[in-house]
Image: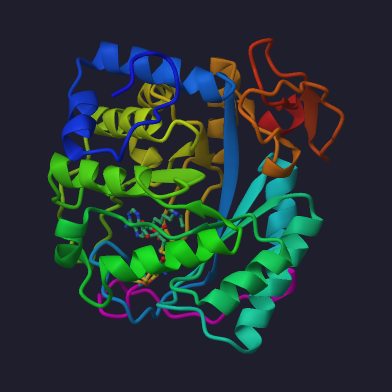
Amino acid sequence: MDDSGKSRSRGPWTVAEARAIHDLPLTELLHRAQSEHRRHHPPNAVQLCTLLSVKTGGCPEDCAYCPQSARHQTGMEAESLLPVDVVLEKARLAKQQGATRFCMGAAWRNARNGTQFDQVLQMVRGVRELGLEACATLGMIGDDQARQLADAGLTAYNHNLDTSQEFYGEIISTRSFQERLDTIKRVSESGISVCSGGIIGMGESVGDRLGMLVTLANLEPPPESVPINALVPVPGTPLAERPPVDALELVRMCATARMMIPTAMVRLSAGRTEMTREAQLLCFQAGANSIFFGDKLLTTGNPDTHADLALMRDAGLEPLVPFAERPQSSDSDTNDASTSASSVQFVSGADDSSHRSHKVSNAIVS
Ligand code: SAM
Ligand code: DTB
Ligand code: SF4
């Protein structure tokens, strides 16, 4: 681990190094993670991403955590792909509420070429035309599909490793960890940002959690965003009876991800409905700087937008501006806020901020 205050430039991360960070006394871990956070990100800005399931249920994969697998009896009906105009209306609403990234999820093992993929490309173009970052998570994709998504303007592709290579087979039997890495490589080579993280609370060991972070941190380049999900135990899935994740375990995961992948957006993802406001703030203190924003994740609940906006207001946090408007270098300093959004009021970032952030107007908090 590099304690010098500079970005790490040595060889690949090891699980032992990750463990030395993860197991620090919590106040020390929080201190180090927040210090690392401030070297790369504005201290008080949180990215708001809204999720929409554009194709729900009926998935042929057997991911043990997932309510959308056709192999589990969750009572979920398989639906067809949503029409483009319905998706774009949801994206417009998300923007009005203050989101800057819109992420579209499909319950597919892999994206297939044809009308449906063309519709997804239209969704991506439409979301970008609204001035939002566009993210998609469609399962495995090929080189040509990655290129088409890049050409349509896709900002990021979400493809989670979910857990360590060693534990992967306990959770999913219908695809391999290597297939996950192969898709991530294609995405990265197409020029689309990689969003990849995982889930805690599935029965994995701390070593498995850290093994996953080591794989992510050693990717070249490392992911642009790292979602940290707490398992949402859904009745009918094989993991329905897993005990709830202790919030402090999420705090440690966020902090360790922040220390190991300092440039990434660390997204506090599924599981926030079970967390207190204080526990969520500890995750922000640990370096989490992104959340899913909207009353629903893909098929399960998420905190009410008003509650999230109130939390941000009470804590003095501000939404982060879209990727395209952010300086690419963490060292640059451009606080000349000039872009406006329909329901948000832009203000200059804090003095020590390298990114611009905007304040949510009272109108949408009330
Ligand atoms: N089918 C695509 C795939 O698997 O990549 C995209 C959609 S899939 C639902 C996206 C991610 O949602 C999964 O990789 C997993 O991390 C997360 N997820 C699904 N069910 C979850 C649950 N019950 N709790 C927490 N995270 C979950
Ligand atoms: C991610 O890491 N978490 C999101 C998003 N990427 C696609 C999905 C969470 C899904 C939680 C269960 C559900 O709502 O179906
Ligand atoms: Fe399908 Fe994705 Fe759910 Fe796995 S996580 S069952 S691939 S929708």
- Which is more toward the observer, 112 or 67? 112
Q: Give the quarter of the figure containing the N terminus.
A: top left
Residue 340: quarter of image: top right
Residue 162 painted magenta: no
The answer to whether residue 11 is visible is yes
Which residue shows up at 61% across the image and 83% down it? 116
Residue 260: quarter of image: top left
- Which is more toward the observer, 188 or 243? 188
Locate residue 293, reporting x and y percent. 55, 43
Locate residue 361, reporting x and y percent. 75, 27
The answer to whether residue 240 is visible is no
Farthest bottom residue in view: 114
Which residue shows up at 51% across the image and 45% down it? 224
Which residue shows up at 65% across the image and 18% down it? 353
- Which is more toward the observer, 262 or 91? 262
Q: Is residue 276 left or right of residue 315?
A: left
| Displayed-image quarter of ligand 3 | bottom left
Q: Is residue 295 above or below residue 264?
A: below
Q: Is residue 167 left or right of residue 272?
A: left
Residue 80 painted magenta: yes
Residue 364: quarter of image: top right
Q: Is residue 57 left or right of residue 251?
A: right
Q: Is residue 290 left or right of residue 204?
A: right
Which residue shows up at 28% across the image and 59% down it? 234
Q: Write the start and end of the magenta stretch as one range.
A: 69-85
Farthest front residue in view: 10
- Which is more toward the observer, 122 or 90? 122
Locate residue 141, reporting x and y percent. 49, 74
Q: Is residue 326 above or below residue 209?
A: above
Q: Main secondary structure of the magenta part?
A: loop
Q: Give the quarter of the figure containing the C terminus.
A: top right
